[in-house]
Amino acid sequence: MKIPLAKLLALASLGAMMLLGMHSAYAQAFPSLFPRQQAKSAREMAPVDFTGQWVSVIMEDWRWRMVTPLKGDFSNIPVNAAAREVGETWDPGKDTAAGEQCKGYSAPALLREPGRVRISWQDDNTLKLETDAGQQIRLLNFSHSAAPPAQKSWQGYSVAKWEDPPGTNRGTFGLGLAPRAGMKSETLEVTTSQVRPGYLRKNGVPFSEQLKMKEYFDLFAEPDGTQWFVVTTIIEDPQYLNSPWVTSLNFKREKDPSKWHPTPCSAT
């Protein structure tokens, strides 16, 4: 007797459900025979290793990163009229007197400062990113269960996850912003909120509390083994920007920590 295909599929589905039900019942009755698998930590799941010391290699925007630009220099940032008005009032002396000389070292601007970065695991689900310029610390949280803090800070609250590079097939480079074509990578995606209003650029180009920031950290190696990471940053701010500001920064792994040179925030 020929059994219709639909009936065969229904019987197969029923059988699978019965097996699942039996497994669940036995697991509850004999838990020692069916131990629960503990979820892996972000550190265990990491497809690449960002830990170590890195130095920024200035391949672009030299004139805005190696020296503090003059007041009113808004070039290369899609600012609106409101941002220009605020930026024209920049007074580094006032910032220093008010104890706000770290305005230019907040999360959206921090990695644009020339200097060095140290990355380590604070715990199994938190990456710690330290800079010698401004002596700042960012925590990248892979555990998303905790609510962001109510109080804003210069570095804000960053949520991290491992992702393939955006807009690509698995393992290929994203956004076309790598300094060398054809490299392979996995991406660390970071979304940051709760940032205290500060400067996108050290000369007073402002951002507001409405800022949204997303970063993609891509790690890759050259044929000789030299390791780099590129961080692509997308910043949106409806109060001060006409469009998203997209930048890419390059960091090269250092062999030892001897060149680490911590310096405090400076308003100039």
Image (cartoon, rainbow, N blue to C red):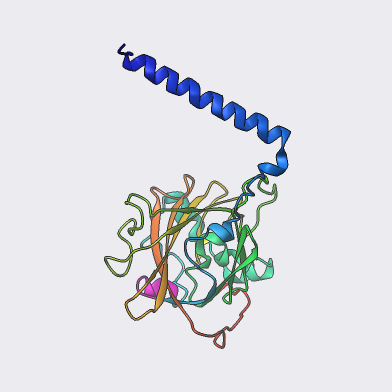
Say how many tags the image has. Answer: 0
Furthest residue in direction front, as rendered: 1
The answer to whether 59 appears left or right of 11 in the picture is left
Residue 98 visible at all: yes
Furthest residue in direction left, as rendered: 181
The answer to whether 4 appears left or right of 257 in the picture is left
Looking at the rendering, the stretch of residues picked out in magenta corresponds to 58-65
Quarter of the image where the N terminus is located:
top left
Residue 120 image offset from top left, x and y in percent: 60, 69
Q: Nearer the viewer, residue 56 or 30?
A: 30
Residue 26 image offset from top left, x and y in percent: 67, 32
Residue drawn where x is 56% and y is 67% of the image: 105
| Residue 59 among magenta residues | yes
Furthest residue in direction top, as rendered: 1
Quarter of the image where the C terminus is located:
bottom right
Say if 185 sits above or below 268 in the image. above
Residue 124 image offset from top left, x and y in percent: 64, 60
Q: Nearer the viewer, residue 100 or 195?
A: 195
Query: Within the image, what quadrant is residue 165 found in?
Result: bottom left
Residue 243 image offset from top left, x and y in percent: 38, 48
Residue drawn where x is 71% and y is 39% of the image: 31
Residue drawn where x is 56% and y is 29% of the image: 20
The answer to whether 59 appears left or right of 36 in the picture is left
| Residue 151 among magenta residues | no
Residue 198 visible at all: no
Q: Nearer the viewer, residue 176 or 156?
A: 176
Residue drawn where x is 41% and y is 50% of the image: 80
